Amino acid sequence: MIFAVATDERTLIAFDSEAAAVAACEGLDVEAADWLFWDGRGNPLEPLFSVPNKRGLFVVQNGVYSLVPAKRDHHANLDEALDEVLNFESPPPFNNAESVREYLTGRAGGNEA
């Protein structure tokens, strides 16, 4: 499970996998900090670009990235960040802050995310 927040709209989306999140969140937007990511336990993730984004005079091209554990203080844990989320665009149980917090609490016991 990967959680992503579109920072401009403050919307949380839950993805079934890293591949699904990366496919939905374009590299140019990710590099511009238009998206923040967390793993299934609510730990911050950051993008690691293996192919950089390209910006030319006439062409822009999304790079290739993966999600890795974020450096310390990169951004807040998801439990804290939920206070800033205004919209939830995922089916239950990820359609409101309370349900997401309950999910994260269940993962804190060591269950695989």
Image (cartoon, helix red, strand yellow):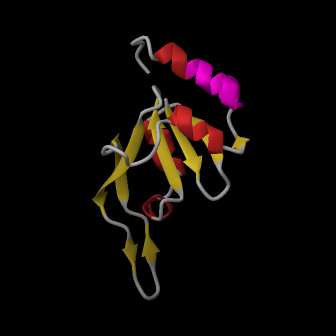
94 left or right, relative to 46: right
56 left or right, relative to 82: left
Asked if residue 61 is positioned above or below residue 9 in the image, the reply reads: below
Point 47% across, 27% down: residue:
40
Highlighted range, magenta: 91-103
Q: Is residue 110 magenta?
A: no
Q: Residue 99's quadrant in the figure?
A: top right
Which residue in the rendered view is the most extreme toward the left? 50
Asked if residue 55 is positioned above or below residue 67 in the image, the reply reads: below
Q: Nearer the viewer, residue 9 or 84?
A: 84
Which residue in the rendered view is the most extreme toward the bottom? 57
Q: Position of residue 3 (x, y in %)?
A: 53, 37
Asked if residue 1 is positioned above or below residue 62 in the image, the reply reads: above
Q: Quadrant of the C terminus?
A: top left
Q: Position of residue 109 (x, y in %)?
A: 43, 11
Q: Nearer the viewer, residue 74 or 5?
A: 74
Q: Position of residue 81 (x, y in %)?
A: 56, 40
Asked if residue 50 is positioned above or below residue 67 in the image, the reply reads: below
Point 53% across, 59% down: residue:
34
Q: Residue 83's quadrant in the figure?
A: top right
Point 37% across, 62% down: residue:
63
Point 66% across, 47% down: residue:
11
Q: Nearer the viewer, residue 45 or 22?
A: 45
Q: Is residue 92 magenta?
A: yes
